[in-house]
Amino acid sequence: MHNALLTLKHSAPSASQEAIRDAPVVGYVYVADVEERTKRLRTLSPLGGRLPMAAVVWGTWDGALAVGMSGLLGA
């Protein structure tokens, strides 16, 4: 999880997977460090303070989608 980018969704963490998937994005945070001993994450985000109670999505980036996005961005 170190160096991961997490998506915060405007949904309760206990909501169904479909509800979390379809919920709007609140923001993104970068995982700068993982303290396994204390079970804490050090995150970097555009706003300071504690993270809001929201569903957090951690996944991978699909290479095919990246190609489509680069075409959209004119790269």
Image (cartoon, helix red, strand yellow):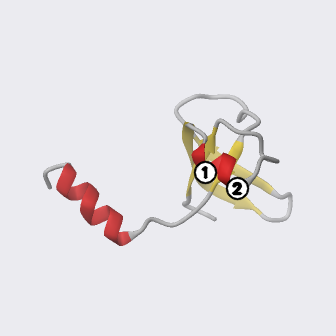
Q: Residue at x 63, y 46 (%)?
A: 43
The total of numbered circles placed on residues is 2
Q: Residue 3 at x, y = what percent?
A: 55, 60
Query: Hey, which residue is sitting farthest right in the picture?
Result: 38
Q: Which structural element holds mark 1?
A: helix
Are the residues flagged by discs 2 and 1 in contact, CB closer than 8 Å? yes
Between 6 and 20, which is closer to the camera in this rendering? 20
Q: Does 72 appear above or below 37?
A: above
Q: Which residue is mark 1?
A: 21
**Which kind of residue does numbered mark 2 sit on?**
Gln
Give the SS element for disc 2: helix
Query: Which percent across, then down, holds residue 25?
Result: 55, 39
Which corner quadrant of the image does residue 2 belong to? bottom right
**Amino acid type of the residue tagged 1 in the rendering:** Arg
* Distance from Cα at disc 2 to Cα at disc 1: 6 Å
Quadrant assignment for the N terminus: bottom right
Identify the residue position indicated by label 2 in the image: 17
Residue at the limit of the structure toward the left, as seen here: 74
55 in relation to 67, above or below: above
Q: Nearer the viewer, residue 46 or 37?
A: 46
